[in-house]
Amino acid sequence: MPRAAVNGINIGFDVSGEGPDTLLLVHGHPFNRSMWRPQVDAARKAGWRVLVPDLRGYGETSVVPGKTPLEVFAADLAALLDHVGCDSVVIGGLSMGGQIVMEFARRYPLRVRGLLLAATFPQAETEDGKRARSAMADRFLREGMQDYAREVLPKMLAPRSIESLPAVARDVMAMMLGTNPEGAAAAVRGRAERPSYEGTLANVTVPALVVVGSEDAFTTRHDAERMRDLLRNSELVWLDGVGHMPNLERPEAFNAALLGFLARTTELAAGAGARPM
């Protein structure tokens, strides 16, 4: 497994494919890079190089206790791109990963060729939300992940997905149970301090794709349409009967949208006469 020693941590990551274009996928909380396996396979077969890291505090990447703001996650991603010699990417993320992607686009706009936002939203945290996240972080440190994982599984996946896709439900549960409580707590505390990304999205000119499920417990139809409206060159894919993990609950539909989106970014780059690594 490749590892990158950057920003004082060791990042565990995978690189698949050898295409001229790179797709960077950012996992959500409390998961790891394995959640993107169906998309890695699809994009690689379509001729893309796919980069999937574990975020700071998750999976096989170093755990740093305390608080991890989204800007730190974004800086880690930029350092990883430097490590693998990649100047610009199509970047996508789910849930917290989507908010990290928005932070990356805010801080490093010239490195972004396309934006995938799945099951996420751009608003800053509310005061009630900040208190809830603080309490959640305290709970992780006090109790670990087990009870939380059992409680939140029905919010991560739609009920029909839990029933009809038992292997997916087991994988999602395993990812949550395998997450380090200190890493999860640090991320939750940092996420509570995120700014609004609506202004960032309004300034994005590259192609964008928004994917949200109709039974997502965290992202509403209004959130999805708001992101689509802010992103001037975007498409919204609304998946009926799907919860907070559309890439795993409906991988065929998600991948079809993803590959169409990637083709748009390639065509745009070709039309501009440049295809940066």
Image (cartoon, grey):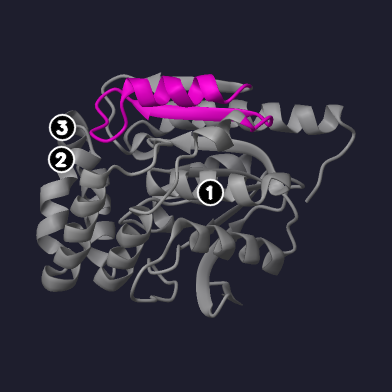
State the residue in front, 98 or 150. Answer: 98
Q: Rounded to the nearest whole Å, what is the CA distance between mark 3 and mark 1?
A: 31 Å
Identify the residue under disc 3: 159
Name above or below for residue 203 compared with residue 73. above
Q: Amino acid at mark 3?
A: Pro
Identify the residue under disc 2: 154
Of the image marks 1 and 2, the number of the one nearer the N terminus: 1
**Total residue callouts:** 3
Q: Is residue 213 magenta?
A: yes
Which quarter of the figure has residue 193? bottom left
Structural crowding at the residue carrying mark 2, measured as other residues with C-alpha within 10 Å and reported as few (<14), some (14–19) or many (≥20):
some
Q: Amino acid at mark 1?
A: Glu
State the residue in front, 175 or 68. Answer: 68
Q: Rounded to the nearest whole Å, what is the CA distance between mark 3 and mark 2?
A: 6 Å
Q: Secondary structure at mark 3?
A: helix
| Whether residue 167 is visible | no
| Whether residue 159 is visible | yes
Name above or below for residue 19 compared with residue 225. below
Structural crowding at the residue carrying mark 3, measured as other residues with C-alpha within 10 Å and reported as few (<14), some (14–19) or many (≥20):
some
Q: Position of residue 249 (x, y in %)?
A: 32, 35
Q: Position of residue 265 (x, y in %)?
A: 70, 31
Q: Marks 3 and 2: CB-CB under 8 Å?
A: yes
Q: Position of residue 70 (x, y in %)?
A: 46, 56
Q: Which residues are magenta?
A: 203-232
Left or right placement of residue 44 versus residue 185 in this view: right
Of the image marks 3 and 2, the number of the one nearer the N terminus: 2
State the residue in front, 220 or 132. Answer: 132
